[in-house]
Amino acid sequence: GTAWAVEDGVLRPGKKRGTWLMSEKEYGDFVLEFEIKLTERGNSGVALRSPMKGDPAFDGLELQFADLRYNDKAKDSELTGGLYRAAAPTKQV
């Protein structure tokens, strides 16, 4: 029920929160490069090595994009660059 769109070279989600944009295929080893833009209260991520079904944040690995403006009680592993609830980034950027 969510319409993702590319506007001016930026991938944007629809208005419904809590949705995922997933590939139709599974991939082995790969190099992934991208830039992120995050609003002050934004919360997003990229699923890595996750199954095609279920919740990527809990059934696989999620590279987290969020900062203390979104959740001022977040643990380091729940902030940008962390593997969600598994490993904290070496620094916040």
Image (spheres, rainbow, N blue to C red):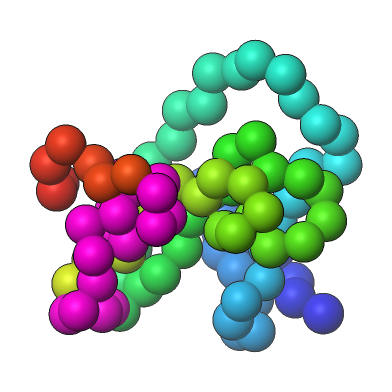
List the single residue furthest toward the front.
86
- Most extreme residue toward the bottom is 16
Residue 65 at x, y = what percent? 36, 57
Measuring 30% from the left and 54% from the top, which residue is drawn there? 77
Question: Which span is picked out in magenta?
Answer: 70-86
Indicate whether residue 85 is drawn in magenta. Answer: yes
Q: Residue at x 77, y 61 (%)?
A: 54
Residue 10 visible in image: no
Q: Is 60 rendered above or below residue 42?
A: above
Of the pair 76 and 10, the residue shown nearer to us:
76
Magenta region's main secondary structure?
Answer: loop
Q: Position of residue 81 (x, y in %)?
A: 31, 45
Residue 15 vs 38, above or below: the answer is below
Q: Is residue 31 left or right of residue 52?
A: left
Q: Quadrant of residue 89?
A: top left
Q: Quadrant of residue 16?
A: bottom right
Q: Does residue 77 show up?
A: yes
Measured as percent of width and height from the top left, residue 64 is found at 40, 54
Against 30, is 82 above or below?
Answer: below
Please state if 82 lies on the left or on the right of 93 as rendered: right
From the viewer's perspective, tell me whether residue 75 is left or right of residue 33: left
Q: Is residue 39 above or below residue 49?
A: below
Marker count (numbered): 0
